[in-house]
Image (tube, rainbow, N blue to C red):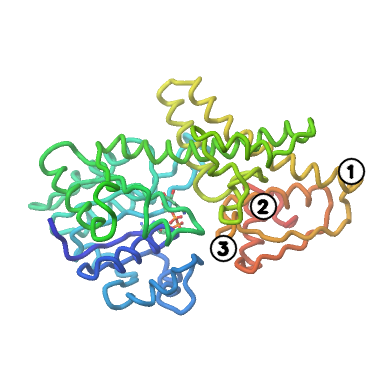
Amino acid sequence: MSLKSICCIGAGYVGGPTCSVIAYRCPDIKVTVVDLSVERITQWNSDVLPIFEPGLDDIVKSVRNKNLFFSTDITAAINEADLIFICVNTPTKSYGLGKGRAADLKYIESAARMIADVASQSKIVVEKSTVPVKAAESISNILRANQKPGVKYQVLSNPEFLAEGTAVKDLLNPDRVLIGGEQNHDGQQAIATLAWVYKHWVPEDNVITMNTWSSELSKLAANAFLAQRISSINAMSAVCEYTGADVSEVAHAVGMDSRIGNKFLKASVDEPVIGKASIGFGGSCFQKDVLNLVYLCECLNLPEVADYWQQVININEYQRRRFANRIIQCLFNTVTNKKIAIFGFSFKKDTGDTRESAAIYVVKYLLEEGAHIRIYDPKVETEQMFRELTHPSISDDPEKG
Ligand code: NAI
């Protein structure tokens, strides 16, 4: 059941913190995090980590170069590992079939091919990235079509539920750990091996196992439910503004119903900004994963279900646009040549991640109206702000940024 060495492909917002916590909680396991990006690995090995998460610095510094290693030698790390996490990015496709909705699986495929090319011993391969249902089957097919004699693979699904800004807390005390695998003897053994890793610190009852497809779908479903909750309170905020009702009072009253609960509805200092009526959700996951679910429903010929989830995205876009319009209205219906300060550019507090931040869209709308914008965020570099604002999907004319 036990294993000695873990490799993680992808040193990003998920791979870095997740594997740091595994190394911290499992001193008997060697954990190596690898990435194609030399810059990212150099940062992980430096005093200034590539991502900001409360509590992460201390954990990394306590185990780095003891049983936690960051490396660009992907071949060596794959070969040494008994178990390999795939934690690469799965962005929304920006080209071809499924453009703007389906997940782009090119990085997953390249990671699977790298494993097949270099592995000379059997491995458990764990899909931690968020993927469409049945992605594990594609990974299995790639691995098995290219496997060397005597090498066997078991592919598991183990989606990650951490939220940026509270990643360390979420990883140390997860609500649940989900492991999906094949329902045969070898599959069950692989599940038990991964469960053994988590049981170093997660109570047994919180580690749940199921079939691979349920596990893959559960991650998309969880993010769709969370995003839907935010769009629900934001839709209510529009009704409030036209009726004189106060959205915080409505959220408070609704959230006191124990069947509904107040998380993600009620404003509180401890909750992320998206936890109350707001400019809408941002971040790399909610929009991407809901779109991924919409695409899945369309492919399954379930147009009513696809439309239902698409509406969660539509309300989010409506809320961002509505917020910018209110600023313009409040400034006498024109912001041309007016100086507007934006405090905060990341998608929520306690993170420097700007992916899909609502701030990007609000700034874009105000720039289009001729406003002069000054942005301040202590966790985001100026170059990063310019990169986001001049990205082709945001600005057709890079000069505008
Ligand atoms: P990220 O973009 O921060 O990191 C991905 C890393 O993978 C990059 O450093 C990239 O260079 C590397 N990479 C890509 N292809 C590679 C290859 N073939 N070999 C080696 N390295 C490779 O992405 P992030 O945010 O860590 O997300 C990873 C996955 O986890 C995604 O599927 C995402 O949906 C999911 N997820 C993300 C969460 C978040 O809060 N960011 C939370 C839960 C799941």
| Identity of the residue furthest to the right in this view | 332
Q: Which corner quadrant holds the N terminus?
A: bottom left
Residue marked by disc 3: 352
Q: SS at mark 3?
A: loop
The residue nearer to you, when weighing 284 against 252, is 252
Q: Which corner quadrant holds the C terminus?
A: bottom right
**Eyeballing the image, is 228 above or below 268?**
above
How many other residues sit within 10 Å of disc 3, few (<14), some (14-19) or many (≥20)? Answer: many
x and y, in percent, of residue 332 in the image: 92, 45
Asked whether, in this view, residue 85 is left or right of residue 262, the answer is left
x and y, in percent, of residue 222 in the image: 43, 39
| Amino acid under disc 3 | Gly
* Figure quadrant of residue 179: top left
**Eyeballing the image, is 266 above or below 85?**
above
Counting residues from the start of the chain, the first of labels 1 and 3 encountered is: 1
Asked whether, in this view, residue 273 is left or right of residue 373, the answer is left
**Which residue does the image show at 67% across and 36% down from the upper left?**
250
